[in-house]
């Protein structure tokens, strides 16, 4: 273990913002974590995965802990399931592809998402009809104040759509060391419900039909998801970005109907998770609130592909703020505020950042 002083974080965040950390250390084991907590007990702590959901505005006047410990452990195996404990430092995309290679189903639609397993669990990612919590059974953490190891159940962690206690009341209180997932073996039924209205980005089912035939395999599902992501999301080798910058807003059914009269093909989803299986008619009848796509509102206002100096919006998706990898955090914030004001002015909606802004 080596601790760095005044370490540039440019290559440790996907916006490529060039700020410095007073101290920086990559942790390769739980023991190293405990040693660092003892040595730097008076420093404020920032836990950083791959920096794929953070925007740095200023230097970090404290210590950055980056867990990189690895390992996938088979906890239990039955005829139809496997229970896998995965170290927090494992790269999420590598883990998903490993699962697909071994025919373990349940996370294949979450392929291609940047970040480490610890960050994925803390963020509660969701994509293409799958939620990270669909297969999550428990999380092991170190409580930073007491240096005790604790095991948490998902129901204790405040999981909602892309929201968790780790992102709010527990922020930098726990360091996630591992997560355990229950995946299916010999699975023949896959999550195919993802679609966009009016064929804007197509659907998983439609993508599959372009290159595969039924019965579909888990490898087919992964490939279809990767093709969908390639069509609609910016590439990290080309842009500085955290992908989707804003949360999808929750509105009343009355507000949805008002917006749907202005915005053609405006979709709606259940509030509690990412699901495409509920029809709009049933959703509006049975619920008081619905979730709507922030990207559709921004697209309607002409933000897709707009650039202003070093910052802009992806030409393929209006929800994705991008940079030319030369922008400062302050430039990104200034640009984002203009997007928020436009939506506020035209639709009466207050967009909330999904990306953590670190000032």
Image (spheres, grey):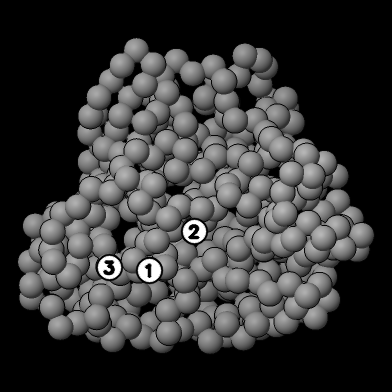
Q: Residues within 10 Å of mark 1 (few under 14, many from 20)?
A: few
Image depth: mark 1 or mark 3 in front: 1
Q: Residues within 10 Å of mark 3 (few under 14, many from 20)?
A: some
Front-lying residue, 170 or 105: 170
Residue annotated with mark 3: 173
Q: Residue at x 42, y 79 (%)?
A: 358
Dot label at residue 169: 1
The percent position of residue 97, horizontal first and vertical second, equals 42, 35
Proximity of marks 1 and 3: CB atoms separated by less than 8 Å: yes
How many marks the image carries: the answer is 3
Dot label at residue 308: none
Residue annotated with mark 2: 163
Residue 196 placement, left or right of 311: right
Quadrant of the rendering where the C terminus is positioned: bottom left
Q: Residue at x 53, y 87 (%)?
A: 330
Vertical side of 134 occupied by 21: above or below: below
Q: Residue at x 60, y 46 (%)?
A: 274
Ranked by sequence position, the earlier of labels 1 and 2 is 2
> Element under label 3?
loop
When asked about the image quadrant of residue 351, the answer is bottom right
The percent position of residue 32, horizontal first and vertical second, equals 11, 61
Vertical side of 338 occupied by 206: above or below: above
Residue 27 makes an appearance in the image: no
């Amino acid at each position: 273990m080596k601790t760095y002083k005044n370490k540039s974080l440019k290559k440790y965040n996907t916006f490529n913002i060039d700020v410095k950390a007073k101290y920086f250390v990559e942790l390769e084991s739980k023991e190293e974590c405990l040693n660092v907590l003892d040595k730097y007990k008076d420093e404020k702590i920032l836990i950083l995965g791959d920096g794929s959901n953070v925007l740095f505005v200023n230097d970090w006047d404290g210590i950055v802990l980056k867990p990189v410990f690895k390992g996938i452990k088979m906890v239990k195996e039955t005829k139809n399931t496997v229970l896998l404990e995965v170290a927090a430092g494992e790269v999420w995309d590598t883990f998903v592809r490993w699962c697909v290679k071994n025919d373990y189903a349940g996370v294949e639609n979450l392929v291609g998402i940047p970040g480490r397993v610890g960050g994925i669990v803390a963020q509660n990612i969701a994509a293409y009809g799958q939620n990270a919590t669909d297969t999550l059974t428990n999380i092991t953490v170190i409580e930073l104040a007491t240096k005790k190891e604790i095991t948490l159940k998902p129901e204790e962690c405040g999981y909602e759509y892309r929201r968790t206690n780790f992102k709010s009341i527990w922020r930098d209180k726990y360091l996630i060391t591992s997560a355990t997932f229950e995946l299916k073996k010999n699975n023949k039924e896959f999550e195919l419900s993802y679609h966009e209205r009016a064929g804007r980005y197509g659907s998983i089912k439609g993508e599959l039909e372009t290159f595969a035939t039924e019965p579909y395999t888990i490898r087919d599902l992964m490939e279809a998801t990767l093709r969908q992501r390639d069509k609609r999301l910016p590439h990290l080798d080309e842009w500085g970005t955290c992908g989707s910058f804003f949360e999808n807003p929750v509105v009343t059914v009355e507000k949805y109907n008002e917006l749907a009269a202005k915005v053609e093909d405006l979709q709606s989803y259940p509030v509690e998770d990412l699901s495409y299986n509920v029809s709009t008619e049933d959703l509006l009848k049975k619920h008081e609130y619905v979730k709507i796509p922030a990207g559709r509102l921004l697209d309607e206002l002409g933000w897709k592909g707009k650039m202003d100096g070093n910052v802009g919006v992806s030409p393929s998706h209006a929800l994705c703020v991008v940079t030319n990898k030369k922008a400062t955090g302050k430039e990104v914030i200034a640009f984002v505020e203009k997007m928020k004001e436009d939506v506020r002015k035209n639709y009466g909606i207050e967009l909330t950042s999904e990306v953590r802004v670190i000032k």
